[in-house]
């Protein structure tokens, strides 16, 4: 899509004029913001290229380049960036510092553009605006404007690109909240929604890149649907409920996305939105290991709803993972049947 005047990009050879091809690695914050980024870049005239779904080759490339101590999602992200490097003129990796006052994203996300730049010697240009809501609105506006200036000198066009992208983002968020997985919400795939009146209801709580990457989670969501479970994700829990839960905690959580996870998990437990919870965390993830302990403690006070914690890394075996999930679903089914029998017994007694 190209709106208005044609944007052209002169390659290093200075011979060819065409739209700039911008690559967006399909990892980490891709599942949250891709429609926004794509819409913004395309409105400015860029051709947007994705790295696609995670594959064994992408994971292996990422693991070979990343630091051993990195968490799995960062390794996967490296792999996606490397998959794009020879196909695009630039790679888009925003540096998200803070999304609201007094909060921060994980340090690994802060350093992401620098990690990608150093992933290979022949890496293309990395476009990395810094978004930081600790700072003024003007600071963030200038960050967005600076990307726009790569493509056009028309300030109105940049403003319209921003408005257009924000609308697209809101539509996407609405679809996620209605229970559509990201690739379905983006219209890239077809499939059934996460909730459609199945007999069990399970909260799958984890970062978007942990629960929606079908390769690293071995199609967890599809499996659960196949076992007859509806799924509640972080996106489907209303923001007001999540905020209410985190505001009850004795200490403030400073990580943006982890606040959301804790709020969603505790709302599921307090309001009995689900029969059980699967909490997915990455091996070597500092923030997740902290909030995991917090959630365990708080959840116990809310009546101890069953919870299975899955810690995943590149060595996680499919057989072991499936066995644990099957056993958990089986336990939830038996518990639900027993509770139903007890309810019937109480009604008969009355
Ligand atoms: S929050 Fe955890 S999983 Fe996510 S990037 Fe940071 S360390 Fe990795």
Image (cartoon, grey):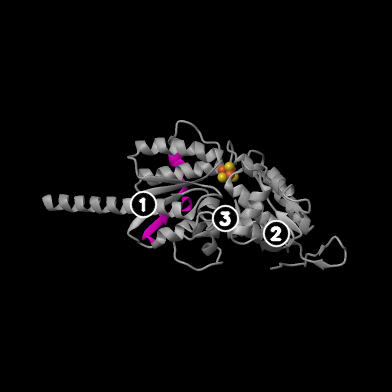
Residue 235 as seen in the image, left or right of residue 124: left
Q: Kindly state the secondary structure of the residue where label 1 is placed.
A: helix
Viewer-proximal residue among 222 and 302:
222
Camera-near label (1 vs 2) is 1
Q: Which residues are magenta?
A: 227-246
Whether tag 1 and tag 3 are in contact, CB under 8 A, the answer is no
User: Who comes first in sequence, dot 1 or dot 3?
Assistant: 3
What quarter of the picture does the N terminus occupy?
A: bottom right
Q: Which residue is mark 3?
A: 31
Is residue 333 covered in magenta?
no
Spatial separation of the CA atoms under disc 1 and disc 2? 39 Å
When the figure is inspected, residue 198 is found, relative to residue 276, above or below; the finding is: below
Of the image marks 3 and 2, the number of the one nearer the N terminus:
3
Residue shown at 73%/57% (left/top)?
85
Drawn side of residue 252 relative to residue 50, left or right: left
Residue wearing tag 1:
327
Query: Dot 3 lies on which element?
Result: helix
**Residue 159 visible (yes or no):** no
Split into quadrants, the picture shows ligand 1 in the one at: top right
Against 256, residue 21 (above or below) is: below
Disc 1 crowd rating (10 Å Cα; few below 14, some 14-19, many 20+) is few
Q: Is mark 3 within 8 Å of ligand 1?
A: no
Instruction: Pick whichever of labels 1 and 2 is earlier in the sequence.
Output: 2
Residue 140 sits above or below residue 221 on the image: above
**Mark 1 vs mark 3, CA separation in Å:** 29 Å
The residue pinned by badge 2 equals 84
**CA gap, disc 3 and disc 2:** 17 Å
Q: In the image, residue 321 lies at what x, y percent?
A: 45, 52
């Amino acid at each position: 899509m190209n709106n208005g005047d044609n944007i052209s990009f002169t390659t290093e050879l200075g011979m060819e004029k065409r739209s700039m091809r911008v690559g967006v690695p399909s990892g980490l914050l891709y599942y949250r913001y891709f429609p926004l980024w794509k819409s913004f870049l395309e409105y400015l005239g860029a051709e947007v290229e994705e790295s696609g779904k995670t594959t064994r080759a992408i994971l292996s490339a990422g693991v070979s380049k990343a630091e051993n101590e990195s968490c799995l999602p960062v390794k996967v992200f490296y792999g996606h960036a490397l998959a794009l490097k020879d196909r695009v003129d630039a790679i888009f990796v925003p540096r998200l510092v803070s999304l609201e006052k007094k909060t921060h994203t994980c340090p690994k996300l802060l350093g992401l553009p620098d990690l990608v730049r150093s992933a290979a010697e022949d890496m293309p240009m990395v476009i990395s605006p810094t978004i930081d809501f600790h700072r003024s609105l003007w600071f963030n506006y200038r960050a967005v404007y600076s990307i726009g200036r790569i493509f056009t000198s028309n300030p109105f066009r940049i403003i319209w690109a921003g408005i257009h992208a924000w609308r697209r983002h809101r539509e996407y968020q609405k679809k996620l909240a209605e229970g559509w997985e990201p690739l379905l919400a983006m219209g890239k795939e077809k499939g059934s929604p996460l909730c459609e009146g199945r007999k069990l209801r399970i909260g799958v709580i984890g970062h978007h890149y942990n629960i929606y990457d079908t390769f690293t989670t071995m199609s967890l969501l599809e499996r659960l649907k196949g076992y007859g479970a509806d799924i509640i994700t972080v996106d489907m829990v209303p923001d007001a409920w999540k905020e209410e839960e985190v505001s009850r905690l004795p200490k403030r959580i400073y990580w943006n996305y982890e606040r959301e996870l804790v709020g969603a998990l505790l709302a599921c437990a307090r309001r009995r939105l689900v029969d059980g919870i699967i909490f997915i965390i990455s091996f070597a993830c500092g923030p997740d290991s902290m909030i995991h302990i917090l959630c365990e403690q708080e959840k116990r006070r809310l009546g101890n709803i069953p919870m299975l914690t899955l810690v995943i890394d590149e060595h996680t075996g499919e057989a072991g993972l499936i066995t644990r999930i099957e056993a958990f679903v089986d336990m939830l089914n038996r518990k639900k049947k027993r509770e139903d029998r007890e309810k019937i017994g109480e009604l008969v007694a009355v």
